[in-house]
Amino acid sequence: MTNQRVISIGFEAMEPELVEKWMAEGHLPHFKKLRDQGTFRKMRSPAEVSSGATWSSINCGVTPGKHGMGFCHRQFKNGSYDVRKKRADEVGRLPFWVDLAKQGKRVCIMDVPETRIYENVEGVQIVGWGLEYQAWDKVSVPAEIMSDIELKYGAHPLHGWYQEKPETTEEWQQIINNVVSATYTRTKIIKDLLQKESWDFFLVAYAETHFAGHLFWHISDPEHPEYDPEIAKILGNPILENYKACDQALKEIMELEPHANIVIISNTGMGPNYSARHFIGPILSRLNLTPEKKTKSIFRKGLEKVLPAADVYAVENFEKLIGPKNITRIKNFIPEKFWDKWSRKFLNAGNNWKDSIAFDIPGDNTGTIRVNLKDREPAGKVDPSDYDSIIDKIEEACMDLINKDTGEKAVREVVRVRKKYEGPNNIDLPDVLIKWTEGKPIYRLYSERFGLIEKDHLPDKRTGAHRDFGFFIGCGKDFLSCSTKNLEQMYNWDVAPTIMHLMELPQSSDYDGNPQLDMINDSFKSETKVEVTS
């Protein structure tokens, strides 16, 4: 066995169509160099479940049905009518680098989403210097690594930030500066770590591309309804600037690691946030699956005026009540776990889920629906024999919907989660996902069944939303050149077995993914036989 080393860089939610466009225009020369010397393919992600499902699928080599992570910010809690913040210790499988460590490999892991510190992993583990979603405490092993980083480079400028939407051009410029400068700082930290030791496996994720896609889409996209050419003249294209900083990172990392196999990952893409998930409540109501709330007392009516709506508008109502800046101040003075628990309870107060046949649960871009099933939910109303017919009813109604302003179908697909993502940990996930037709905002829906449904706005301050495909680039002595083979798409959960294969190590039979042998050169395959373990 040879000493197979892999350096993997994750650029969170980096959009493959933008990467290809900007490579062609000469903005990303080092992405292009890696693409041309190695392999490039789009990688399908389970972003339809939620962006929270994507990294766990990469890390563990399994689908959301097995790892159970979905909309982690406010994930439905099975066995209740409640939601909670789901943390990294609730991922239903261990990441593949735990197996690497068991087989004697030294690893360095930094800021990979949905992860925590794992025992008996030789090397360095860093969690929470700068994450878009904080699923674990800010910690490192060895313990002094985090303090050393912050002593030398400072804290991440967006750590702990509540992500309030800027109101002035000056505030937007400050956030842009924070994101781009953090990208360059992260690269410096990576270079320090790479020079610390010749790691068998190294994996880091850049959260900054995730921040940029959500926050700056309307500044960078002239087709977006919120695009302002005068503001764009001042601010430029902040997503492009962030990608260029990532391109420079690749150059500097490749100079340090010219002989390792390099794996570049984007866990999911990003596009304009044209979700119509705020229509799910009215759709379920018109199908008589969710009843109207019945207020029985004057006290309750008064309480409902200050409580969030326990629906898709809950966060918006919460922020109007308290204020984003006040939320940031409050979070600085109370324990994070206390905040996570009680803020979610408050956001979910007053729901009528137990009285529903099917109900709208919190989600990301897609519509997310849960069936109130007997023997699963505490006050289940739907007999298991009627489960499929309820979903049939939802699917038929949704597929008939038209975007009134374009005349096109509003829904491109209805996903039955338990059929697509089988496994013991799908119990916290929605039963049904409604995937919207991309390309245009949806303000008005129409069908002969419902007539016209109008909603004034999407309650989401993020102007960019996750898309189905990220990408994978492999470059190094064991990868084919992209000109040699026409490569098809892969899946998020193929990453772990592919890296294990490149490192000539046994793979677990529990993986849902497969090593992508058609991107690996023939000489490596002829010399390597990798076993599958139980």
Image (cartoon, rainbow, N blue to C red):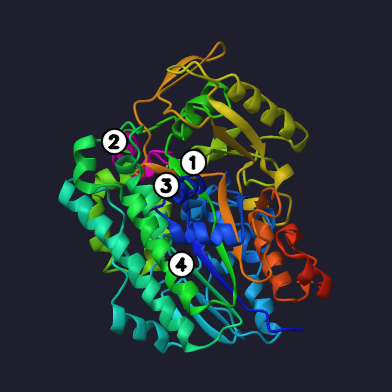
Residue 248 shown left or right of residue 368 in the figure: left
| C-alpha span from label 1 to label 2 | 20 Å
30 and 441: which is toward the camera = 30
What's the mark number on residue 227?
2
Mark 3 sits on what residue? Answer: 25
Q: Residue at x 36, y 62 (%)?
A: 245
Q: Examine the rendered structure and indicate whether residue 70 appears above or below residue 137.
A: above
Label 3 sits on what residue type?
A: Glu
* N-terminal label among 2 and 3: 3
Q: Secondary structure at mark 2?
A: loop
Residue 533 visible, this angle:
no
Mark 4 sits on what residue? Answer: 250
177 and 157: which is toward the camera = 177
Q: Quadrant of the N terminus?
A: bottom right
Point out the frontmost of discs 4 and 3.
Answer: 3
Label 2 sits on what residue type?
A: Tyr
Residue 345 shown left or right of residue 33 in the figure: left
Point out the frontmost of discs 1 and 4.
Answer: 4
* N-terminal label among 1 and 4: 4
* N-terminal label among 4 and 3: 3
Label 4 sits on what residue type?
A: Leu
- Crowding around mark 3 (Cα neighbors within 10 Å: few <14, some 14 to 19, many 20+) is few
Label 1 sits on what residue type?
A: Asn
Q: Residue at x 46, y 51 (%)?
A: 23
| C-alpha span from label 4 to label 2 | 30 Å
Q: Which residues are magenta?
A: 300-315
Q: Examine the rendered structure and indicate whether residue 302 appears above or below residue 1.
A: above
Mark 1 sits on what residue? Answer: 365
Point out the frontmost of discs 2 and 3.
Answer: 3
Q: How many marks?
A: 4
| C-alpha span from label 2 to label 3 | 22 Å
